[in-house]
Amino acid sequence: MRITNVLERSAPLDSAIRNAVIDFSQMTASCVAVVTDVVRAGKPVIGYGFNSNGRYAQGGILRERIIPRLLAANPENLLTDDGSNLCPFKAQQVMMANEKPGGHGERSVAVGTVDMALWDAVAKIEEQPLSRLLARRYNGSQLDERVYVYAAGGYYYPGKQLQGLQDEFRRYLDLGYDACKMKIGGADLDEDLRRIEAALKVVGDGQRLAVDANARFDVPTALQYADALQSLGLKWYEEPVDPLDYAAHAEIAAAYDGPLATGENLFSMPDARNLIRHGGLQADRDILQFDPVLSYGLVEYLRTLEMLESNGWSRRRCIPHGGHQFALHIAAGLGLGGNESYPEVFQPFGGFADECDIENGMIRLPNVPGIGIELKSDLMAVFDELVAGAKL
């Protein structure tokens, strides 16, 4: 058993939107296909992966460092001890060879993208959904048959008025979601409060609305927003300050009585551990949004979960950023608290399989081997183009 090729390409995100910090009109994503010599149904098993939104494509790092290391490795050094399957843990050691500790920036995204493709291949080789494989290996065979998902949107669109925001959230509720998330910080406080009020008129209750500042605020501004939001009973107040400013998080946490959510821009277990040690978050209230793809992949995410549990945090407090099928399988297989979803943005990467319906905010995963990217037609078209004419 061996990896015969690793293919990559950059693809654009079809999203003319912005949050409080960046716009996504020029955003790209990396797509990776890990080709193996294992044959199922007369075709080689191929694992597919891509990076989550918010970080650009990692083509340079993938082509110059990560992929060459995998292809140059002794095939046996990428396999489980019994040689029956690929081993993502050993593959991460190979991908990170000759890399200094720390500096968890762009390379964590490149490694995480390949990690997704590896786990997709592993589950396909074992002929079972990734969620079921993860439950068996790492969660005492306890599988969540349905996963909670919320609809992330409410961006600042060109020319979008309050009516447009309300119409968007009505569409999400009609799709079966029971909670929505919107952006704040891209306007002044008075305008954002008008937007929040308009959203609440649609969703009906603060517990059905989360707000996300995308780390835009300094501490005084974050506290000003916290004071204004305090009485609304929101689902959570997300990323009020810089993700690495743990003292600032602690100050906001001490002043704000509602749930805080953060973590999507922390890209390693040590960074997550520093948040837990110094960020003032409460294990019975707050939400952790570490993104497996952006933070070296599922291999590192498992280390992060182990750290959290040793510090008294439940896995149910974890709701990953990313809004994709990989994180959905991780949530189901490892017993997390849910998963983000992008019903209308970041296409073709946002969202789940075409035939997966949401009911009362819950989604059931399809029973197919791997992640099930093949069941999301617009996304699979990107990968079909990637492998077309390549050496398989």
Image (cartoon, rainbow, N blue to C red):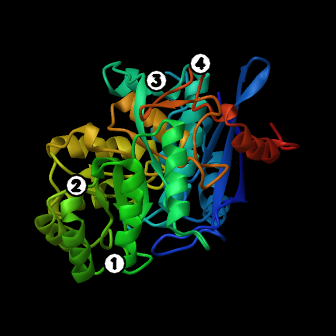
Kindly identify which residue carries mark 1.
189
Task: Kindly indicate whether the residue at mark 2 contacts the one at mark 3 (C-beta within 8 angstroms).
Answer: no
Left or right, 357 with respect to 180, comes to: right
Of pointers 1 and 3, the one earlier in the residue sequence? 3
Q: Residue at x 44, y 48 (%)?
A: 292
Task: Kindly indicate whether the residue at mark 3 contacts the one at mark 1 (C-beta within 8 angstroms).
Answer: no
Q: Mark 3: which secondary structure?
A: helix
Residue 307's spot in the image, x, y percent? 23, 46
| Up-down relation of residue 195 to residue 150 (above or below) | below
Residue 17's spot in the image, x, y percent? 59, 67
Mark 4: give few (<14), some (14-19) or many (20+) Cα within 10 Å.
some
Kindly identify which residue carries mark 2.
233
Residue 244's spot in the image, x, y percent? 30, 70
Q: What amino acid is found at the position of numbered circle 1 in the picture?
A: Leu
Of pointers 3 and 2, the one earlier in the residue sequence? 3
Q: CA distance from mark 3 to mark 2?
A: 38 Å
Of pointers 4 and 3, the one earlier in the residue sequence? 4
